[in-house]
Amino acid sequence: MHGKLGSLVLLLTIVGFGTGTARATDDSVKGAARALSNEAKRDFDAGRFEEAGRKFQRAYEVAKVPTLALWAARSLAKHGQLVAASELYRQATRLTANDLWVGNAQQQAQEDAGKELAELQPRIPVLRVRVEGAAANDVTLTIDGAMIASALFGIDLPADPGWRRVVGKCGDESSEQTVYLREGDHKEAVVKFSARPVAQAANPAVVPMAAVPMAAAQPVAPAGAEGPSAQTLTTPTPAQAISSGGAQQTWGWIAVSVGAAGLIMGGVTGIVVLSDSSLRNSCPNGVCTSTVSKSKVDNYNLMRTLSTAGLIVGGVGAAVGVTLLLWTPRHETDSRAALWLGPGSLALKGTF
């Protein structure tokens, strides 16, 4: 593929190893790299690209120069290892000069690496792996045995052409997919798991009810319950019940007092209206004659309104108060009450 130009570049590299312009790199290291690169070049020319790539990479580990990275990348690309080849091309373009750089050979190798990388990239297949039925953090995923971080799930990953084996494991369950990739393909592999039940806390030890104080015997919220649903399972303690009952009793007595005041006011004003027979006779069916003064009519209507309103408010207040008192939670005692209502009087008797 690269013919005489490739042989010339490699020859310049070997010559560079043997020059005496700098002695920072040990002579034995240069000799080893030179021998490996010569063997690798023979393998490459013979079409043994896997062997050539392995030897060029070993030589590159000893001597970090662009020419060796370039030839290692070429060998890997010929063998179908496009992802590794692209990485070596990139490394070749990023190397900085050292004591092994002689003439323009290394600079030319960097330029060639950049061009060949641009040609290679569209050929590299892309594989995206998606996980279903399990949380990404609970899944161990490998592609051809290489571990893939959970952060890369659902991300386009460069892959080599050929059959790719995707294996996912979640607990005791495993899922496997095989995908065939051609150069330039963009494919997706879906690793599916069955729905996993939510883990539940172990059942607490059974304790006889007789050994549990009544104040402590409360329903237990299910594991993982949150918010108001968990709180509603809590049984009020006797102290809480007493406190709630005391508040209800207080409001009950207040309502009874308001009701009593309303009934008294309604009764008194009603008596006043009924006692004024002259005005009542002058206003049959609520219509007054012209002999009655306007002030007396206004006073009459006001007293009637107050009487009606007082009786209504009194009746409602008394009913609400008695209801609250009768339904107040009791603690070890029973409550009984009775209500007497008479003209101008209200009485409530009972034990609470």
Image (tube, rainbow, N blue to C red):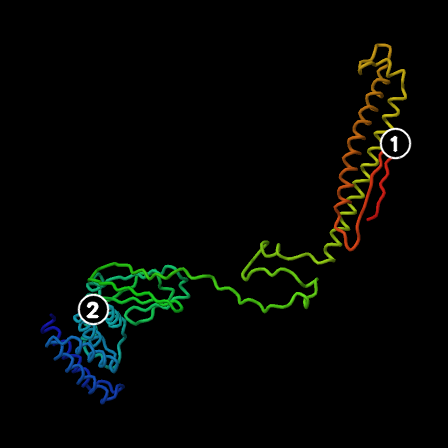
Q: Secondary structure at mark 1?
A: loop
First reached walking from the N terminus: tag 2 or tag 1: 2
Q: Dot 2 surroundings within 10 Å: few (below 14), some, or many (20 or more)?
A: some
Seen from the viewer's position, the closer of residues 203 and 314 is 203
* Residue 86 in the figure: left or right of residue 232: left
Q: Which mark is residue 232?
A: none
Instruction: State the residue lying farthest toward the top.
Output: 290
Q: Position of residue 130 (x, y in %)?
A: 34, 60
Location of residue 38 (image quadrant): bottom left
Height in image: 29 above or below 203?
below
What residue sits right under mark 2 in the picture?
111
Q: Position of residue 228 (x, y in %)?
A: 59, 54
> Which amino acid type is marked by label 2?
Glu
What residue sits right under mark 1 in the picture?
344
Height in image: 23 above or below 220?
below
| Residue 126 visible in rendering | yes
Q: Residue at x 18, y 83 (%)?
A: 36
| Residue 104 visible in rendering | no
Q: Position of residue 59 (x, y in %)?
A: 22, 81
* Residue 166 in the figure: left or right of residue 17: right
Seen from the viewer's position, the closer of residues 2 and 138 is 138
Q: Nearer the viewer, mark 2 or mark 1?
A: 1
Location of residue 271 (image quadrant): top right
> Which amino acid type is marked by label 1?
Gly
